Amino acid sequence: MSTPANAGQSSAGWTVHAKRVLIAWLVLSAIATPLVWFVLGPHLPPGKGSVQADGQVFDNTVLTAFVTPIISLLLVFFVYALIQFRADSSTDLADGPPMRNDSTVQTTWVAVTSVAVLFLAGFGTYELLKDGSGGGQGPNPIAKVSGNNLQVQVIGQQWEFTYRYPTYGGVETSQLVIPAGREVAFHVTSLDVVHSFWAYQLGVKADANPGVDNVAYVKAKKVGTFDIRCAELCGLWHGYMFDTGRVVSPSQFASWITARRAQFGPVAKYLPPYSTTYSPDPQYRAG
Ligand SMILES: [Cu+2]
Protein backbone atom coordinates (compact mmCIF):
# COMPACT_ATOMS: atom_id res chain seq x y z
CA MET A 1 0.00 0.00 0.00
CA SER A 2 1.64 3.27 -1.09
CA THR A 3 1.35 6.38 1.00
CA PRO A 4 -0.43 9.23 -0.77
CA ALA A 5 1.40 12.50 -0.99
CA ASN A 6 -0.90 14.17 1.50
CA ALA A 7 -1.09 11.25 3.92
CA GLY A 8 0.84 12.51 6.87
CA GLN A 9 -0.69 13.78 10.04
CA SER A 10 -2.58 16.47 8.22
CA SER A 11 -6.37 16.24 8.45
CA ALA A 12 -6.48 15.38 4.71
CA GLY A 13 -4.08 12.51 5.42
CA TRP A 14 -6.25 11.20 8.23
CA THR A 15 -9.30 11.40 5.99
CA VAL A 16 -7.56 9.16 3.44
CA HIS A 17 -6.67 6.65 6.17
CA ALA A 18 -10.21 6.73 7.57
CA LYS A 19 -11.73 6.15 4.11
CA ARG A 20 -9.47 3.18 3.44
CA VAL A 21 -10.23 1.62 6.83
CA LEU A 22 -13.95 2.25 6.34
CA ILE A 23 -14.02 0.66 2.87
CA ALA A 24 -11.94 -2.33 3.96
CA TRP A 25 -14.18 -2.75 7.00
CA LEU A 26 -17.38 -2.63 4.94
CA VAL A 27 -16.04 -5.13 2.41
CA LEU A 28 -14.80 -7.56 5.07
CA SER A 29 -18.04 -7.27 7.07
CA ALA A 30 -20.17 -7.78 3.94
CA ILE A 31 -18.27 -11.00 3.21
CA ALA A 32 -17.79 -12.34 6.76
CA THR A 33 -21.23 -11.69 8.27
CA PRO A 34 -23.24 -13.80 5.76
CA LEU A 35 -20.59 -16.55 6.04
CA VAL A 36 -21.05 -16.58 9.81
CA TRP A 37 -24.84 -16.57 9.50
CA PHE A 38 -25.26 -19.19 6.80
CA VAL A 39 -22.13 -21.38 7.03
CA LEU A 40 -20.95 -21.30 10.66
CA GLY A 41 -24.34 -20.70 12.30
CA PRO A 42 -25.95 -24.12 11.67
CA HIS A 43 -22.91 -25.81 13.26
CA LEU A 44 -22.90 -23.80 16.47
CA PRO A 45 -23.69 -25.68 19.70
CA PRO A 46 -25.71 -27.31 21.16
CA GLY A 47 -27.40 -28.62 17.99
CA LYS A 48 -31.07 -28.95 17.20
CA GLY A 49 -32.14 -31.80 19.49
CA SER A 50 -34.92 -29.79 21.11
CA VAL A 51 -36.94 -26.62 20.60
CA GLN A 52 -34.86 -24.97 23.33
CA ALA A 53 -31.52 -26.19 21.86
CA ASP A 54 -32.67 -24.89 18.46
CA GLY A 55 -33.34 -21.52 20.09
CA GLN A 56 -29.86 -21.52 21.60
CA VAL A 57 -28.31 -22.20 18.18
CA PHE A 58 -30.30 -19.23 16.82
CA ASP A 59 -29.18 -17.02 19.72
CA ASN A 60 -25.55 -18.07 19.29
CA THR A 61 -25.83 -17.34 15.56
CA VAL A 62 -27.30 -13.87 16.17
CA LEU A 63 -24.60 -13.03 18.72
CA THR A 64 -21.77 -14.33 16.52
CA ALA A 65 -23.11 -12.51 13.44
CA PHE A 66 -23.59 -9.35 15.49
CA VAL A 67 -20.02 -9.39 16.74
CA THR A 68 -18.54 -10.15 13.30
CA PRO A 69 -18.52 -6.52 12.03
CA ILE A 70 -17.05 -5.41 15.35
CA ILE A 71 -14.22 -7.96 15.15
CA SER A 72 -13.79 -7.06 11.46
CA LEU A 73 -13.25 -3.40 12.38
CA LEU A 74 -10.64 -4.32 14.99
CA LEU A 75 -8.84 -6.63 12.55
CA VAL A 76 -8.91 -4.11 9.68
CA PHE A 77 -7.66 -1.32 11.89
CA PHE A 78 -4.95 -3.57 13.39
CA VAL A 79 -3.66 -4.80 10.03
CA TYR A 80 -3.92 -1.34 8.43
CA ALA A 81 -1.97 0.23 11.30
CA LEU A 82 0.66 -2.51 11.14
CA ILE A 83 1.25 -1.89 7.43
CA GLN A 84 0.60 1.82 7.04
CA PHE A 85 2.10 3.22 10.21
CA ARG A 86 5.04 0.88 10.45
CA ALA A 87 8.22 2.67 11.53
CA ASP A 88 11.42 1.70 9.77
CA SER A 89 14.64 1.42 11.69
CA SER A 90 15.72 4.95 10.79
CA THR A 91 12.61 6.52 12.32
CA ASP A 92 12.84 8.34 15.59
CA LEU A 93 10.47 6.39 17.84
CA ALA A 94 9.62 9.26 20.17
CA ASP A 95 5.95 9.88 21.00
CA GLY A 96 3.90 11.83 18.49
CA PRO A 97 1.94 14.94 19.39
CA PRO A 98 -0.80 14.36 22.00
CA MET A 99 -4.30 13.65 20.67
CA ARG A 100 -7.04 15.79 22.14
CA ASN A 101 -10.65 14.78 22.52
CA ASP A 102 -12.86 14.70 19.49
CA SER A 103 -16.50 15.20 20.40
CA THR A 104 -17.79 13.61 17.18
CA VAL A 105 -15.83 10.42 17.81
CA GLN A 106 -16.87 10.36 21.47
CA THR A 107 -20.57 10.93 20.75
CA THR A 108 -20.60 8.32 17.98
CA TRP A 109 -18.77 5.82 20.18
CA VAL A 110 -21.16 6.22 23.13
CA ALA A 111 -24.25 6.15 20.88
CA VAL A 112 -23.21 3.07 18.86
CA THR A 113 -22.07 1.02 21.85
CA SER A 114 -25.19 1.97 23.86
CA VAL A 115 -27.50 0.89 21.03
CA ALA A 116 -25.54 -2.35 20.58
CA VAL A 117 -25.63 -3.26 24.28
CA LEU A 118 -29.31 -2.32 24.70
CA PHE A 119 -30.27 -4.31 21.60
CA LEU A 120 -28.48 -7.39 22.94
CA ALA A 121 -30.06 -6.97 26.38
CA GLY A 122 -33.52 -6.70 24.82
CA PHE A 123 -32.92 -9.62 22.48
CA GLY A 124 -31.59 -11.82 25.32
CA THR A 125 -34.54 -10.99 27.58
CA TYR A 126 -37.06 -11.75 24.83
CA GLU A 127 -35.39 -15.07 24.04
CA LEU A 128 -35.26 -16.08 27.71
CA LEU A 129 -38.94 -15.31 28.24
CA LYS A 130 -40.07 -17.20 25.15
CA ASP A 131 -39.73 -20.74 26.52
CA GLY A 132 -37.22 -20.55 29.34
CA SER A 133 -34.38 -21.41 26.93
CA GLY A 134 -33.74 -24.72 28.67
CA GLY A 135 -32.43 -23.07 31.84
CA GLY A 136 -33.47 -23.80 35.40
CA GLN A 137 -35.96 -21.17 36.52
CA GLY A 138 -36.41 -22.10 40.18
CA PRO A 139 -39.66 -23.33 41.74
CA ASN A 140 -41.86 -20.64 40.11
CA PRO A 141 -40.86 -20.36 36.44
CA ILE A 142 -41.55 -17.01 34.81
CA ALA A 143 -41.29 -18.42 31.30
CA LYS A 144 -43.93 -21.12 31.39
CA VAL A 145 -44.81 -23.35 28.48
CA SER A 146 -48.37 -23.99 27.52
CA GLY A 147 -50.08 -27.33 27.29
CA ASN A 148 -49.98 -30.58 29.15
CA ASN A 149 -46.35 -31.29 29.97
CA LEU A 150 -44.76 -34.46 31.28
CA GLN A 151 -43.26 -33.96 34.70
CA VAL A 152 -39.93 -35.71 35.28
CA GLN A 153 -38.00 -35.27 38.48
CA VAL A 154 -34.21 -35.26 38.27
CA ILE A 155 -32.54 -36.12 41.59
CA GLY A 156 -28.83 -35.39 41.92
CA GLN A 157 -26.75 -37.18 44.50
CA GLN A 158 -23.09 -38.08 44.88
CA TRP A 159 -22.48 -39.36 42.21
CA GLU A 160 -25.35 -40.13 39.91
CA PHE A 161 -28.68 -38.81 38.76
CA THR A 162 -31.90 -40.73 39.24
CA TYR A 163 -35.24 -39.90 37.65
CA ARG A 164 -38.72 -40.05 39.01
CA TYR A 165 -41.99 -39.97 37.09
CA PRO A 166 -44.72 -38.70 39.44
CA THR A 167 -47.56 -39.23 36.97
CA TYR A 168 -46.60 -42.90 36.65
CA GLY A 169 -46.89 -43.94 40.28
CA GLY A 170 -43.72 -42.09 41.31
CA VAL A 171 -41.55 -44.80 39.76
CA GLU A 172 -37.83 -44.04 40.08
CA THR A 173 -35.26 -45.21 37.54
CA SER A 174 -31.58 -44.78 36.83
CA GLN A 175 -32.33 -44.08 33.15
CA LEU A 176 -33.74 -40.90 31.67
CA VAL A 177 -36.17 -41.59 28.84
CA ILE A 178 -38.51 -38.93 27.46
CA PRO A 179 -40.96 -38.90 24.55
CA ALA A 180 -40.27 -36.85 21.41
CA GLY A 181 -42.58 -33.98 20.54
CA ARG A 182 -43.94 -33.48 24.03
CA GLU A 183 -43.12 -30.69 26.44
CA VAL A 184 -41.24 -32.04 29.46
CA ALA A 185 -40.91 -30.19 32.77
CA PHE A 186 -37.76 -31.30 34.57
CA HIS A 187 -37.98 -30.75 38.30
CA VAL A 188 -34.36 -30.78 39.37
CA THR A 189 -33.32 -31.25 42.98
CA SER A 190 -30.55 -32.82 45.04
CA LEU A 191 -30.24 -35.12 48.03
CA ASP A 192 -26.87 -33.85 49.22
CA VAL A 193 -24.66 -31.18 47.66
CA VAL A 194 -25.09 -28.79 44.71
CA HIS A 195 -25.02 -30.54 41.34
CA SER A 196 -26.00 -29.31 37.89
CA PHE A 197 -28.12 -31.29 35.47
CA TRP A 198 -26.76 -30.70 31.99
CA ALA A 199 -28.46 -32.52 29.08
CA TYR A 200 -26.24 -31.18 26.33
CA GLN A 201 -28.07 -31.97 23.07
CA LEU A 202 -31.39 -30.95 24.66
CA GLY A 203 -29.95 -27.55 25.57
CA VAL A 204 -30.93 -28.03 29.22
CA LYS A 205 -28.86 -26.93 32.17
CA ALA A 206 -30.29 -26.55 35.64
CA ASP A 207 -28.70 -26.44 39.08
CA ALA A 208 -29.63 -29.27 41.42
CA ASN A 209 -29.75 -27.73 44.88
CA PRO A 210 -30.83 -29.61 48.01
CA GLY A 211 -34.23 -28.41 49.18
CA VAL A 212 -34.98 -26.59 45.91
CA ASP A 213 -37.36 -27.57 43.09
CA ASN A 214 -35.66 -26.13 39.99
CA VAL A 215 -37.88 -26.30 36.90
CA ALA A 216 -36.53 -26.45 33.34
CA TYR A 217 -38.67 -27.05 30.25
CA VAL A 218 -37.67 -28.90 27.13
CA LYS A 219 -39.40 -30.25 24.06
CA ALA A 220 -37.31 -32.87 22.27
CA LYS A 221 -37.65 -32.70 18.49
CA LYS A 222 -36.36 -36.07 17.36
CA VAL A 223 -35.70 -39.59 18.54
CA GLY A 224 -32.12 -40.24 19.63
CA THR A 225 -29.70 -40.08 22.54
CA PHE A 226 -28.29 -37.18 24.50
CA ASP A 227 -25.41 -36.75 26.92
CA ILE A 228 -26.07 -36.01 30.56
CA ARG A 229 -23.33 -34.59 32.73
CA CYS A 230 -23.08 -33.06 36.13
CA ALA A 231 -21.81 -29.53 35.47
CA GLU A 232 -21.00 -28.53 39.04
CA LEU A 233 -17.95 -29.79 40.91
CA CYS A 234 -19.64 -31.98 43.52
CA GLY A 235 -16.94 -34.06 45.12
CA LEU A 236 -14.43 -36.81 44.43
CA TRP A 237 -16.25 -38.66 41.63
CA HIS A 238 -17.83 -35.63 39.96
CA GLY A 239 -15.99 -36.49 36.74
CA TYR A 240 -17.78 -39.84 36.60
CA MET A 241 -21.23 -38.36 37.04
CA PHE A 242 -22.40 -38.79 33.46
CA ASP A 243 -25.07 -40.74 31.71
CA THR A 244 -26.83 -41.14 28.37
CA GLY A 245 -30.50 -40.22 28.06
CA ARG A 246 -32.89 -41.32 25.34
CA VAL A 247 -35.61 -39.59 23.35
CA VAL A 248 -38.09 -42.17 22.06
CA SER A 249 -41.42 -42.13 20.26
CA PRO A 250 -44.53 -41.64 22.44
CA SER A 251 -45.57 -45.28 21.98
CA GLN A 252 -42.08 -46.55 22.91
CA PHE A 253 -42.19 -44.29 25.95
CA ALA A 254 -45.54 -45.72 27.01
CA SER A 255 -44.25 -49.28 26.85
CA TRP A 256 -40.95 -48.34 28.53
CA ILE A 257 -42.62 -46.65 31.50
CA THR A 258 -45.10 -49.54 31.84
CA ALA A 259 -42.19 -52.00 32.01
CA ARG A 260 -40.37 -49.85 34.58
CA ARG A 261 -43.48 -49.68 36.74
CA ALA A 262 -43.73 -53.46 36.65
CA GLN A 263 -40.02 -53.83 37.40
CA PHE A 264 -39.77 -51.34 40.25
CA GLY A 265 -43.28 -51.67 41.63
CA PRO A 266 -42.26 -54.13 44.37
CA VAL A 267 -39.61 -51.75 45.76
CA ALA A 268 -41.67 -48.58 45.35
CA LYS A 269 -43.07 -48.96 48.86
CA TYR A 270 -39.59 -48.38 50.28
CA LEU A 271 -39.25 -45.03 48.54
CA PRO A 272 -40.33 -41.85 50.26
CA PRO A 273 -43.58 -40.48 48.79
CA TYR A 274 -43.06 -38.27 45.77
CA SER A 275 -42.11 -34.75 46.76
CA THR A 276 -40.59 -31.80 44.90
CA THR A 277 -37.70 -31.83 47.39
CA TYR A 278 -36.23 -34.36 49.80
CA SER A 279 -34.47 -33.66 53.06
CA PRO A 280 -31.77 -36.22 53.71
CA ASP A 281 -32.60 -37.92 56.97
CA PRO A 282 -29.51 -38.09 59.24
CA GLN A 283 -30.50 -41.53 60.58
CA TYR A 284 -29.98 -43.08 57.13
CA ARG A 285 -26.53 -41.61 56.59
CA ALA A 286 -23.50 -43.85 56.78
CA GLY A 287 -22.05 -43.42 60.28
CU1 LIG B 1 -20.84 -33.00 39.87
Image (spheres, rainbow, N blue to C red):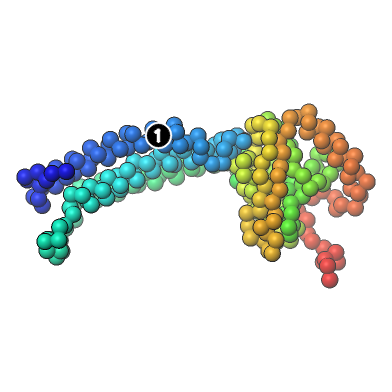
> Which residue appears farthest toward the bottom when viewing the image?
287
Q: Residue at x 74, y 43 (%)?
A: 176
Neighbourhood count class around disc 1 (C-alpha, 10 Å): few under 14, some 14–19, many 20 upward: some
Which residue is at 70% across, 54% downward? 241
The quadrant in which the N terminus is found is: top left
From this view, report whether residue 249 is shown above or below residue 86. Answer: above
Report the side of 146 relative to 60 (left or right). Answer: right
Task: Give how far across and how far down residue 253 sits, in percent.
Answer: 78, 33
The image quarter containing residue 203 is: top right
State the residue in front, 30 or 102.
30
The x and y percentages for residue 107 are 25, 48
Residue at which label 1 appears: 35
Residue sitting farthest toward the right: 266
Which structural element holds mark 1?
A: helix
| Residue 126 visible (yes or no) | no
Q: Looking at the picture, does residue 95 appear above or below residue 272?
A: below
Question: Where residue 85 sits: x, y (%)?
Answer: 17, 53
Please tell me which residue is depicted at 88% across the width and 45% down the height of the picture. Answer: 264
Residues 217 and 56: in front is: 56
Identify which residue is drawn at 85% across, 40% down. Answer: 260
Tell whether 65 sits left or right of 170: left
Quarter of the figure that contains the C terminus: bottom right
